[in-house]
Amino acid sequence: MSDRPLLLEIITALEEQGLDRDEYQLQRMIDAEALERLVDSTGPQTDLEVRFSIGERRVIVTPSDVAVIKVS
């Protein structure tokens, strides 16, 4: 993952999947600061994986990556 804040990584990943910022209110769905602290407290070799859904997309956060997949 880059040196950018985790929240920006999540927003970028959502935008890359075609979601506009007006389509979701991330601050109402997750506590981004708590999620970042959790991820930062682990190492890249950890099996930590946090998943949450935004509409038809699932966001998957690990210590090394943020991925967004469309679920049907």
Image (spheres, rainbow, N blue to C red):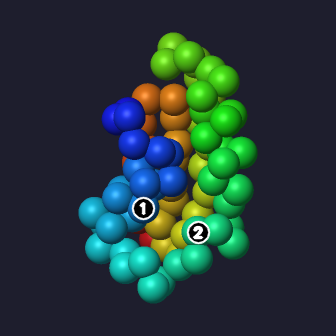
Left/right placement of residue 24 relative to residue 37 reads left
In the picture, the disc for residue 29 is none
Secondary structure found at label 1: helix
Left/right placement of residue 44 relative to residue 47 reads left
For label 1, the residue is 11
Q: Quadrant of the N terminus?
A: top left
| Mark 2 surroundings: few (<14), some (14-19) or many (≥20) residues within 10 A | some
Left/right placement of residue 4 relative to residue 47 reads left
Please name the residue shown 35% across and 58% down the image.
12
Q: Nearer the viewer, residue 6 or 58?
A: 6
The answer to whether the residue labelled 2 contacts the one labelled 1, judged by CB atoms less than 8 Å apart, is yes
Please name the residue shown 66% across and 24% down the image.
41
Three-letter amino acid code at the position of disc 1:
Ile
For label 2, the residue is 26
Percent position (x, y) of residue 66? 43, 44
Secondary structure found at label 2: helix
Percent position (x, y) of residue 26? 58, 69
Percent position (x, y) of residue 15? 33, 67
| Mark 1 surroundings: few (<14), some (14-19) or many (≥20) residues within 10 A | some
Three-letter amino acid code at the position of disc 2:
Leu
Q: CA distance from mark 2 to mark 1?
A: 8 Å
